[in-house]
Image: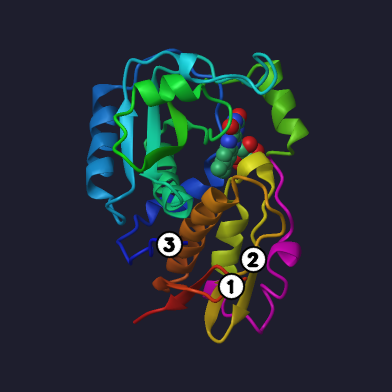
């Protein structure tokens, strides 16, 4: 992590959004309503903990931005709005943190999303995003109203990556839930457990040490790991907040990545 994640007010409603959010890949072709678009615009303007990381909301754009994994398999369909997460080169962790706040805010508003860092058309995405020198697209997401029942290929894809399952807490954060861990740290780890990650790989491991929740090195070098880390950090912070503890992120010595330290 290069840019620090400074303390910034988080909406406690995002905690509730964590457990109801799932990725949506099929939408009903409706444009995002003016009220919802205004709420998202206001979020984008307000939530700038890291000024170098920004979100562009692209309206009235067909789903041609998205590609399938293999052919049209797994493609996003029926979305007319996209949010593009833009960050300086190498700042994917910060993009994950800010992007996930957007995803949870969209969920709070009743809008579906899906992190897409791989299956999109890079040329098309770059053509709709005014990138300054040094900036790059870290990821994007469709935004819209998901169809009630996902079609067969989306359901199959969820099965393949076991999208509805998560690794047990005992594997991700050994000791969590025991007397050795304070409640806030266990809540933080549990919220982190539900973070979406690329291919549902869940590479981050957590431990409680010297009064802080430490995010250790990742278990594998999957290319989305830096974005995944930023997402996990936001979730952990929301979990701690839910247990009444305001935490702040401090850098950790390699191979660890970051420490959530209770403040006040
Ligand atoms: C950083 C990141 C990148 C992702 N990239 C893609 C992608 O390119 N295409 C896609 O269909 N899903 C993508 N996903 C969605 C994951 O497959 C999904 O989050 C995971 O399977 C867990 O399912 P859930 O989001 O429904 O909880 C990505 C997720 C993350 C966090």
Q: Earlier in the sequence, mark 1 or mark 3?
A: 3
Q: Point out the residue furthest to the front here.
A: 133
**Residue 165 covered by magenta stretch:** yes
Q: Which of the 4 image quarters holds residue 198?
A: top right
- For the residues labelled 1 and 2, the Cα–Cα distance comes to 8 Å
Q: Position of residue 225 (x, y in %)?
A: 60, 51
Q: Earlier in the sequence, mark 1 or mark 2?
A: 2
Q: Is residue 223 above or below residue 263?
A: above
Q: Give the residue pinned by disc 2.
A: 217
Residue lying at 72% horizontally and 45% vertically, measured from the top left: 165
Q: Position of residue 132 (x, y in %)?
A: 29, 37
**Residue 233 covered by magenta stretch:** no
Q: Is residue 145 visible?
A: no
Quadrant holding ligand 1?
top right
Magenta range: 164-185
Q: Give the residue pinned by disc 3.
A: 2
Residue lying at 67% horizontally and 52% vertically, measured from the top left: 202
Q: How is the image coloured?
A: rainbow
């Amino acid at each position: 992590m290069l840019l620090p994640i400074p303390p910034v007010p988080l909406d406690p409603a995002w905690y509730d959004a964590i457990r109801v959010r799932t990725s949506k890949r099929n939408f009903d072709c409706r444009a995002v309503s003016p009220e919802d678009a205004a709420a998202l615009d206001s979020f984008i303007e307000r939530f700038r903990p890291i000024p170098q990381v920004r979100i562009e909301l692209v309206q009235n754009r067909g789903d041609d931005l998205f590609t399938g994994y293999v052919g049209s398999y797994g493609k996003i369909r029926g979305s007319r709005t996209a949010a593009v997460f833009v960050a300086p080169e190498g700042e994917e962790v910060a993009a994950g943190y800010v992007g996930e706040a957007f995803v949870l805010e969209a969920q709070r508003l009743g809008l579906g999303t899906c992190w897409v860092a791989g299956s999109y058309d890079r040329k098309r995405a770059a053509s709709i995003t005014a990138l300054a020198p040094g900036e790059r697209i870290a990821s994007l997401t469709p935004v819209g109203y998901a169809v009630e029942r996902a079609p067969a290929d989306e359901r199959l894809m969820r099965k393949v990556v076991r999208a509805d399952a998560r690794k047990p807490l005992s594997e991700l954060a050994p000791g969590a839930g025991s007397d050795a861990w304070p409640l806030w740290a266990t809540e933080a780890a549990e919220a982190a457990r539900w973070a979406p990650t690329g291919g549902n790989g869940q590479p981050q491991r957590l431990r409680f040490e010297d009064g802080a929740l430490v995010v250790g090195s990742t278990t594998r070098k999957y290319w989305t790991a830096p974005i995944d880390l930023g997402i996990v950090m936001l979730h952990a912070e929301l979990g701690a907040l839910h247990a009444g503890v305001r935490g702040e992120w401090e850098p950790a010595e390699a191979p660890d990545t970051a420490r959530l330290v209770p403040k006040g």
